[in-house]
Image (cartoon, grey):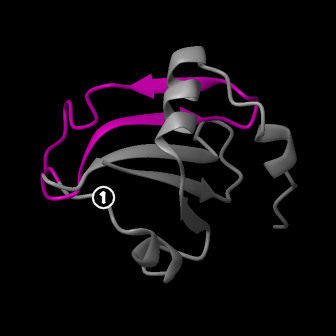
Amino acid sequence: MEYIKLFWKHNFCDEPVVIFYEVDLENERLATRSIDIFADGKTKNIDNFYEGAIEIVPIPTIEEFNSDMYGEEFNACLMAGEEFERVWSSRIYCEISMLMKPISK
């Protein structure tokens, strides 16, 4: 497994600002689980990432996320599986206040 922490800079109040992905490297980089983290610190665990999907696509690599291929507003890094599991179990992400800065319009 590979664990990715994706930061998304935007002004949408109903969209996550951080997304954690658990990526299965032996199954075409498909996500097994993900966690959406919102600006207010709330989290949403997603245990069936592709439920309702029209097309199943692999999760990009951190290099692809950081190449601006998906837009400048995305920045990704690897994370420890232990951190993913801690947030998944607790449904708490304490670092959100350190990430939040207003986006210029």
Q: Position of residue 71 (x, y in %)?
A: 52, 75
Say which of 7 and 26 sits in front.
26
Residue type at mark 1 is Ile
Magenta residues, dominant SS class: loop
- At 61% across and 57% down in the image, what residue appears? 8
Q: How many numbered badges does the structure rendering display?
A: 1
The single residue placed furthest to the top in the displayed view is 90
- Position of 22 with respect to 58 (left or right) is right
Q: Which portion, as a residue range, is magenta?
A: 27-56
Say which of 80 and 102 sits in front.
80
- At 52% across and 35% down in the image, what residue appears? 82
Say which of 62 and 13 sits in front.
62
Image: 75 above or below 41? below
Image: 89 above or below 32? above
- Position of 11 with respect to 48 (left or right) is right
Say which of 94 and 8 sits in front.
94
The answer to if 40 sits in the magenta stretch is: yes
| Quadrant position of residue 91 | top right
| Quadrant position of residue 62 | bottom left
Image: 83 above or below 70? above
The answer to if 72 sits in the magenta stretch is: no
The quadrant of the rendering that contains the C terminus is bottom right
- Position of 8 with respect to 70 (left or right) is right
Query: What residue is pinned by disc 1?
Result: 59
Crowding at dot 1, Cα within 10 Å, few <14 / some 14-19 / many 20+, comes out as: some
Q: Position of residue 50 (x, y in %)?
A: 21, 37
Dot 1 lies on which element?
loop
- At 67% across and 22% down in the image, what residue appears? 92
Q: Position of residue 23 (x, y in %)?
A: 31, 49
- At 52% across and 45% down in the image, what residue appears? 19
